């Protein structure tokens, strides 16, 4: 027996003792004293003295350590296998992803963007799961007679036992035939008698979860199986935090692959890198914007500062967070765990932090104090969520306040008018331009002015304005910064009408400098292919949102087709979506609001073209909308560019 103690009366300054090995020089015999526990009054059971018992057999000691490590790793990774999660299995050996083909064959040679490489967890009991193909709901990953294949979900051959290893990889073992695991050779082919030998095979997979950093998600950024990145009371950050609410971060998506992280426990405090420091005292500016760099080899992420490229959130030897350069020694590696999944904003990019539905506000302050202007939103007014008509004020205008003037043409509207403002750092909107008496607004020939708070968008490059009525003649929109007097003029001179022109009630307008638009207006040609299946057509409303390098088009109703009747079986409908150039397209969001199952729609694919070019962007769908998943009906789906990540 061995007594081990560590005397430090400061909570959190303890010691995690793995084991002690004592070697007898006279007999050359080793005695292993296994611990794997904290000696810290602030961790675990709070003990700082432990009795350790020797194991003379090194093999037994190593086996015990391995078993504890496996259990610890499963505790850290088991969240990935919750029912309803969508997973990918990456093989380090093959450099490819496991995929299940329509003919039931399987391999481990897929690309990350391969639609056949996505699997939904449809059953979970402990570490036993069934992985159903996300693309082909009638097939699940199975082991049948030693072969990896696709079989009908629910069969005994489809039940897999997930066995985690200390290297954060998982084995997928057949429950029906213990000891048999899903294995592929180095080319990604299914292992069989022709394989060269065990050295040529691999059955370990890195498990990746889709949708970890969606807007509104709450995540832990683990630094070890029992520690995480945590905001401390003094505003500094440490990688030694407990796996508790103190270490929870809320995701605010800025654009594709870029987000901000706000402390859940301390609202309005964001992770940032600024002036050579890394802490949690950010307020939502560009110093809080991070690019998510994903590492396939161990399913970790690194956070690169957008404002200071090449600088990552790193950890020093004492656990304190500090800016660091990217290395593979693990100092910039974080292992995300999703506490609560977020959701993509269907109207475009994620709203800024204060527009999130679950904003944390102290109820006492909310009752006793007037509301602060919302970031990226509007100034306080009697109309919730809307802009306030412009009027003289005694207080000084804020740095983020703009006066928005809207000039109506020959035809007015009593509909709700909405504005979005896009900049190189984010988007503000939707902002409702309304008041208690909408009948006084947007009359023919009238100019209406509103005061609007526009925060965290950076340099403005476009706006979007629209209404939910039938028609409106819009002549001009002007934005004037109330402090600097900088003015942005947007000449519209257009009908926003379901009856006239292209049937669109939304328009986008680029900022003009020196007589030239900073980005051109593009009239995208969108070909929507309805499938050949029986009853594939629909009379329901279908909407679409294009996403690119420069934001999104907003959700647009596909109203006016080149065909007399839209969305018929086997038909290709062409629509025009006018938007300020989005750069390289990345994905498409489709929405079909069908109230009756007979009006469900089968979409084959969406093809987007730019006039004057021969290139096209293909977004494969090949499924019904709406669709049922885990008992919930989903009316929308994201389609990613074919051949892209």
Image (cartoon, rainbow, N blue to C red):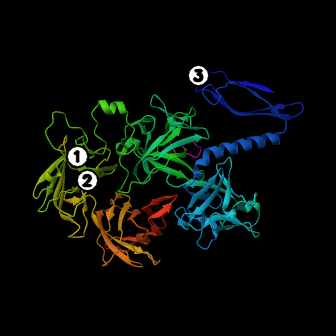
Provide the secondary structure element on which disc 3 rests: loop
Position of residue 558 relative to residue 266, above or below, is: below
Question: Residue 597 at x, y = what percent?
Answer: 43, 68
Q: Nearer the viewer, residue 233 or 539?
A: 539
The residue labelled by disc 1 is 387
The residue labelled by disc 3 is 10
The residue labelled by disc 2 is 419
Circle 1 crowding by C-alpha within 10 Å: few under 14, some 14–19, many from 20: many
Q: Principal SS element in the magenta part?
A: loop
* Disc on res. 554: none
Visible residue check, residue 71: yes
Circle 2 crowding by C-alpha within 10 Å: few under 14, some 14–19, many from 20: some
Q: Do the residues labelled 1 and 2 touch (CB within 8 Å)?
A: yes
Give the magenta part as a residue range.
326-333
In terms of sequence position, does the residue under pointer 1 or pointer 3 come before the other? 3
Question: Residue 307 at x, y = what percent?
Answer: 39, 44
């Amino acid at each position: 027996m061995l007594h081990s103690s560590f005397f430090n009366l400061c909570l959190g300054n303890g010691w995690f003792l793995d084991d002690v090995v004592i070697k007898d020089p006279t007999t050359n015999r080793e005695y292993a004293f296994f611990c794997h526990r904290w000696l810290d009054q602030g961790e675990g059971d709070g003990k700082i003295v432990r009795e350790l018992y020797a194991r003379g057999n090194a093999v037994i000691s190593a086996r015990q350590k391995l078993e504890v490590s496996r259990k610890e790793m499963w505790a850290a990774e088991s969240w990935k296998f919750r029912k309803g999660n969508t997973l990918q299995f990456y093989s380090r050996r093959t450099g490819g992803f496991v995929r299940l083909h329509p003919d039931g064959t399987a391999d481990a040679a897929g690309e990350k963007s391969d639609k056949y490489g996505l699997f939904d967890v449809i059953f979970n009991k402990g570490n036993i799961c069934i992985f159903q193909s996300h693309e082909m709901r009638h097939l699940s990953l199975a082991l049948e007679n030693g072969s990896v294949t696709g079989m009908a979900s629910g069969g005994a051959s489809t039940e897999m036992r997930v066995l985690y290893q200390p290297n954060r990889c998982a084995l997928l073992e057949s429950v029906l035939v213990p000891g048999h695991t899903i294995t592929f050779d180095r080319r990604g082919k299914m292992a069989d008698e022709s394989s060269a030998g065990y050295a040529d095979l691999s059955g370990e997979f890195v498990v990746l979860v889709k949708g970890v950093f969606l807007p509104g998600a709450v995540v832990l950024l683990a630094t070890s199986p029992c520690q995480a990145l945590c905001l401390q009371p003094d505003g500094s950050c440490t990688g030694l935090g407990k796996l508790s609410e103190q270490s929870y971060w809320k995701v605010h998506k800025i654009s594709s692959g870029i987000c901000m992280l706000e402390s859940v426990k301390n609202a309005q405090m964001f992770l940032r890198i600024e002036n050579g420091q890394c802490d949690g005292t950010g307020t939502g500016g560009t110093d809080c914007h991070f690019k998510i760099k994903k590492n396939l080899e161990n399913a970790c992420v690194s956070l690169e500062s957008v404002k200071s490229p090449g600088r990552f959130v790193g950890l020093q030897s004492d656990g304190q967070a500090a800016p660091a350069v990217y290395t593979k020694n693990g100092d910039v590696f974080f292992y995300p765990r999703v506490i609560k999944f977020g959701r993509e904003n269907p109207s475009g990019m994620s709203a800024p932090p204060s527009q999130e539905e679950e904003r944390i506000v102290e109820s006492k302050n909310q009752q006793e104090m007037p509301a602060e202007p919302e970031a990226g939103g509007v100034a306080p007014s009697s109309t919730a969520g809307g802009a306030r008509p412009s009027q003289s004020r005694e207080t000084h205008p804020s740095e983020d306040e703009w006066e928005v003037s809207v000039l109506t043409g020959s035809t007015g509207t009593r509909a709700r008018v909405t504005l979005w403002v896009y900049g190189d750092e984010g988007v503000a909107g939707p902002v409702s331009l309304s008041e208690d008496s909408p009948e006084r607004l947007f009359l023919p020939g009238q100019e209406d002015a509103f005061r609007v708070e526009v925060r965290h968008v950076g340099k403005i490059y476009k706006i979007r304005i629209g209404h939910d009525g039938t028609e409106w003649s819009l002549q001009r929109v002007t934005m004037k910064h109330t402090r600097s007097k900088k003015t942005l003029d947007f000449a519209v001179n257009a009908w926003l009408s379901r009856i006239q022109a292209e049937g669109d009630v939304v328009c986008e307008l680029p900022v003009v400098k020196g007589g030239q638009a900073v980005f051109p207006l593009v009239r995208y040609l969108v070909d929507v292919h309805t499938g050949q299946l029986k009853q594939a057509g629909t009379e329901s409303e279908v909407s679409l949102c294009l996403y690119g390098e420069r934001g999104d088009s907003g959700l647009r109703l596909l109203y006016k087709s080149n065909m007399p009747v839209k969305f018929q079986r086997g038909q290709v409908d062409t629509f025009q979506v006018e938007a300020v150039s989005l750069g390289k397209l990345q994905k498409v969001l489709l929405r079909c609001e069908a109230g009756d199952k007979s009006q469900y729609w089968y979409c084959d694919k969406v093809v987007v073209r730019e006039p004057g070019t021969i290139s096209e962007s293909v977004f494969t769908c090949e499924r019904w909308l709406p669709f049922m998943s885990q008992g919930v009906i989903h009316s929308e789906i994201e389609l990613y560019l074919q051949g892209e990540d």
